[in-house]
Image: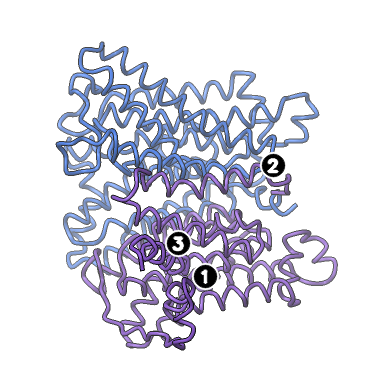
Amino acid sequence: MNPEPSLRSSTRLALAVGVSLALTCAVLAIFSADFWGALAQFFIAPFSNRYFFGNFLADAVPLTIAGLGVLIAFRSKNFNLGGEGQLYSGALVAGILALRLGSGTNPLALWIMVSIAGALVGAFIAAISGALKAYRGVSEMISSFLLSAIVMNVIDFFITGPLQDPASNFQTTRQIAARLLLPKILAPSKLDVSAFLALALVVGIAVAAERTRFGFELKICGENEEFARYCGIPFTRYSIGAMAISGGLYGLAGALLVIGSQGRVMRGFSSGIGWSAISVALLAQGSELGIVPAALFVAFLGSGSNQVMIGSGIPSEIISILQAVTLFFITAQALPRFRRRRNA
Amino acid sequence: MSASSSMLIDILKYTVAAATPLLFASMGGLFSELSGMLNIALEGLMGIGAFFGMAAAGLSGSLVIGALAAVGAAVLGALLMGAMTIRLRANLFIVGLAMNLLSGGITAVLSQWWYHTKAVVAFSLASPQVVFPHILQAIPLIGPIIFAQSWFTMSSWLWALAVAFIVRTTRHGTRIRATGMNAAAVAALGFSPDSSRRAALVWSGIGSGLGGYALGLSISAFVPNIVSGRGWVALVAIYLGQRKPLWIAASCLLFALAESLSNYIQGFSTIPPLLVLALPYAVTLISLIFAKKNAR
């Protein structure tokens, strides 16, 4: 963004990644009986066979899509705290559509419809927060969080009530017909073709940011609100639009999970993706193409933690510690102007 | 006494008890909010308070030592946040996010290490009952609802009173409020806005630590995700209460009432409990929309 600290930002990034990996080793050394075994499990297991590798890549897919959404909101100086609810609502809409339309539907038509519907719902919810900020001066962080809390409770009600699968012991909707689910790649892992869509979105949005008027003007809005207004750029519209795109990508990520690896909408299945996507966007340091390695890194820490938990009894929650430390190191300058804006 | 009135008393009694952690945390969070900092880490600091408070109480057998440990651990967390945001000029929102993650991670890992479980860690703690005079307990409605609460619930209201007093009348409170309104003016008067901000974070640590400890004591156990969103509720209550101590306390009661109703109406009513839980958030959002445009 601003040219001056760009060198330092890459140093910080290296520091954040390096320290979190070193901390991983330290935690493993303290808590595991067999340090080298645990170390190998953490770092090598995600690559050890098709199944683990595919699952690791599959975890990165929603993080990539939602991370892009967070990044675009950042561009317009918006903090979208409602990602969990937007993702969940995209998932619910996708689930309802797929279950209602039934197994006779053309799969391709269903995937397109479900993706658009999920994205629209997420976009609508986030756009409300954008509009409230623009017209009523309500902090978008608070309103997006509140909307998300409302939406999540209402969706929980639908999943455990009218949509509950009577045959299941879990709080979940019925299973979507197998032929309506996205084709798998790297079977038997849960990776599916939504990975290609995620990559296409990254490239598409990166190009749009560089080459289109919208991308250019959005960048100016993010860098200097007054300058943007002075140039006649409709700042308010861009701010709301960026929130809507952000929510739309969250909703899309939720919809793809439902017609992809999940196959149904379980209560609380969004847990954590919304927050992790924020880490991904911060790690990417404002670059669309950076989202891919950032999502892979966060997914790698996650699957490594899961592997270690299975092997050595170290709780998989160490991933939260690693993510927290990464954030601590990266934030000191990820968005340096934000504090001043709040206290101005 | 009829069945419906005894149920009403049950619901209200549970409401006052459920408001305890919210009251502690939101009154603490009021300080950071007044100093101009949106502290989204109340949730994480509550988790830290719950874990370390219960661990220390279980180890020592003393509820007071537990409370001190809960406050100490949460204040350390708040000071870390202060160092990050004030010294290193880090973004408070991201530091708060990181603190929430850190809290869940550290408590789970330590729970596994110390107690060899990530599930329920139960403590047998004898919680002394407050002995209220019979004449108070005999007051209809109020007696069985208010003069039947634990000493911790009673002290949460003392805490709320103390916070209201500090915020409104003391020099310390005034400086914190002034920092939130106009940090440059505070600096021009020769006071440090940064030390006010740090103090405000410490206050939010104290409140969150006690709030988390109250949660642990209420079930005499520590379980992962024991806070489960109450830190966020406490933050929202500050907004619903428009940063006024009395109204924040009322907001905490409203959220606690929703929790209490959602527990009790199952089987009694056709209103789905999960929708009841969504209501206070909707009320908060509406109140923010119709509040006069305020500075962010």
Judging from the image, mark 3 belongs to the subunit labelled B
Q: Nearer the viewer, residue B253 or A171?
A: B253
Please give the residue where the numbered disc 3 appears in the rendered image.
B44
Dot 1 falls on a residue whose secondary structure is helix
Return the x and y of residue B67 as percentages of the image width and height: 44, 80
Please give the residue where the numbered disc 1 appears in the rendered image.
B24
Dot 3 falls on a residue whose secondary structure is helix
The colour one sees for chain A in the rendered image is blue
For residue A91, the mark is none
Cα–Cα span, label 3 and label 1: 14 Å
Please give the residue where the numbered disc 2 appears in the rendered image.
A137
Q: Residue at x 64, y 24 (%)?
A: A216
The purple-tinted chain is B
Return the x and y of residue A314 as percentages of the image width and height: 24, 62
Whether residue B259 is visible: yes
- In which quadrant of the rendered view does residue A35 lie? bottom left
Return the x and y of residue A106 as percentages of the image width and height: 26, 11
Q: Nearer the viewer, residue B250 or B91?
A: B250
Q: Is residue B157 left or right of residue A262?
A: right
Q: Nearer the viewer, residue B288 or A187?
A: B288
Q: Nearer the viewer, residue A261 or B119?
A: B119
Q: Is residue B219 left or right of residue B71?
A: left
Amino acid under disc 1: Phe
Label 2 Cα neighbours within 10 Å, binned few <14 / some 14-19 / many ≥20:
some
Cα–Cα span, label 2 and label 3: 27 Å
